Amino acid sequence: MSSLRSAIVHCMAILLWVVPALAQQQSDNAVPSALEVLNDATNGSEEIGEQAEEWVSELEYYLQHPLDLNRATAEQLSVFPFLNSLQIQAFLNYRKLLGAFTSVYELQAIPGWDLATIRKIMPFVRVQEQHAAISVASRMPIFQAISRYQRAFPKSWGYVKTTGSRYLGSPDAWLIKCQSWGDRYRAGFIAEKDAGEPWFRSFNSKGFDHYGAYLELRKQGILERITVGDYEINFGQGLVSWQSFSLNHSAYALQIEKNAEPIRAHSGTAENGYYRGIAAQLREGDWQQVVFFSYTSPGAYWDSADGHRVITSWDQNGYHRTLTESTHRGVTQLFAGGARLGYYFSAGHVGFNAVYHRLTVPVQKSQKTYNQFAFSGNVLYNISVDYAFSISNQHFFGEAAWCAGNRLAFLQGWMMQLSQTVDVGLLFRHYDKAYRAFYANGFSAGGETANETGGYLATEMHWPRWQVYAYADVYHFPWWRYQISGPSRGTEDLLRISYQPINAPSSSATIMLQVRYRQQAKDVKTNNGQLPLPTQLWQTQFGWQWERSSWWWACRGFYHVFRQTDSLYRQGVAIYGEWGQQVKNRFSWNTRLAWFNVPSYEARIYTYERSVLYQYSYPFYYHNGWRVYLNLRYRPSRHLSVELRWASTWYLDQQQIGTGLDQIDGSSKHQLIAQIIWKW
């Protein structure tokens, strides 16, 4: 075995011409480069965006405290979106066969790991023997405190009005977040006030609108971890519970298998979609057990027309700015409990999951046809069996779930490495129209783990300078959905091609072309009432980026076409240029100038924007105008970081921006963010 390892290391020495190029990967661009590929995978959802902030924080953590390749688990590697399950399994097999890594450049010897992938992961990983000093430091406790202030200008109607429905707080948003972690523990505290929420007055007498905390202990004998406070539960493939962020129909085409720690501390700002209580994970030999108990009070809309209070829908955004919004708090209490028993063997695992929920106030949705099979009542329980295993160059995974009322959900996936450069994957799912689970998040096109049957085919191809990502998804909704009056079918296809004409030690250049096509039914008002007619949306992107040792610049263009009928045809165009520079190790800046002309909301264009550290920004362009932002980051010492962000949008075709209480009189709006990070 030692002779084989020696041969591999010598082969790496022959390939020294790529090593400088890998070493020059700029860490400040590592996270943004990964996030830009997500495109509109989150669809601008505020709830998903808040979940994504936790994921971004984890990426930033590994950027500052690189993951040791000799201790990395499959769950930890799955955090990186550019690694698919086949590559992760190949990594684990290589380490198991040849033993501990002696150098990060040994990654080049792993089957299916191309140079582009290695360049992306290099800033996030290390080998312990290579950095003994860093290894010792990484075992020391780390403390971090974040204070973030945010405000939009000018004030909207919600702050100007003095009577009627209005925002009762100031337009200032404030976040305080403290964290500490070490090899055997992690602890955190968060306090947040959104813009418009009152501060020590009106219905809020406790200061911040939202508080959260957690304490997690690890590696205490057979007790792998125990978490007290706020946490997230992730079982199987998300058919009974998956509360953490996960990709769905992104340009990383083979990101179709969910793989994460079953218990994760909830450290983000989302005010719903997590548990509060206690959770424990035990491991003895090949067996893993998870058990949790929770008692929370999720926000909800309610009605009491018949004299009894019932929940009509859930409050997903967590805003409490007006008297009406304040009534969404404390409507009901939710008790939850569950368990997982898993058996792990060399090639995979099989697990049995059970989750139980009880509400103190029952759910009763509005009497709409699309709600006919929606959950009603106050008790819901789910059980499932999930599995994953690898055979040679193939990987299988799936889950079968059951809910009260004898309704089923099923998902099966398969991936295969056809060659050193080509991977393929296939996923089939069937979710009964009446299947329900409180925190299910299975792979889907409709955003719900219910009322859907579909098949997904994907491939990824990697060569030294070329990367190709493609998928095709065909699905069927057997029952009505919101704004779809009847059963319907749809499809979504994507092709992304990336080319690196320059890959030198001192600079690199990347050219990208992406085309996405969606066809899905949507109601249109006709003489015969609402009828679901197919819509077509073409989304095209073209861009390039050039990086040097201390600076980079990029340009990207977007062209969207939306069509439903001959008379409903809309187009949208946007283009931006972006520049950035790292000045030694203390100061960095980046800026973007964008022009957009998107007359129709249906053709809106989502874009990822760089922001202050740990914040996830994914706005969309609509109307006609310009947008610019500037980010500044200064590190006066290794313990302190100060950041400022200013963003402005000018509309050429609007004299009023927004609607309702968010309406602004004028054609421009601005945003200021200031953040301070202390670390010691």
Image: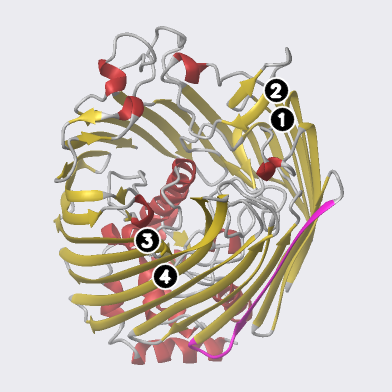
User: Tag 2, which secondary structure?
Assistant: strand
Q: Is residue 128 above or below residue 392?
A: above
Residues under labels 4 and 3: Cα distance?
23 Å
Apparent side of residue 208 relative to residue 271 in the rendered image (left or right): left
| Classed neighbour count for the residue bearing mark 4: other residues with Cα under 10 Å, few (<14), some (14–19), many (≥20) | some
Q: Quadrant of residue 200?
A: top left
Residues under labels 3 and 1: Cα distance?
39 Å
What x and y, as percent, mark residue 226? Answer: 67, 39
Residues under labels 2 and 3: Cα distance?
42 Å
Q: Earlier in the sequence, mark 4 or mark 3?
A: 4
Query: In front: 376, or 395?
Result: 376
Q: Is residue 408 magenta?
A: yes
Residue sitting at x 29%, y 72%: 23
User: Tag 1, which secondary structure?
Assistant: loop
CB-based contact (under 8 Å), mark 2 and mark 1? yes
Name the residue beneath numbered marker 3.
567
Q: Earlier in the sequence, mark 2 or mark 4?
A: 2
Q: Is residue 302 above or below residue 200?
A: below
Residue sitting at x 21%, y 55%: 596
Q: Quadrant of residue 50?
A: top left
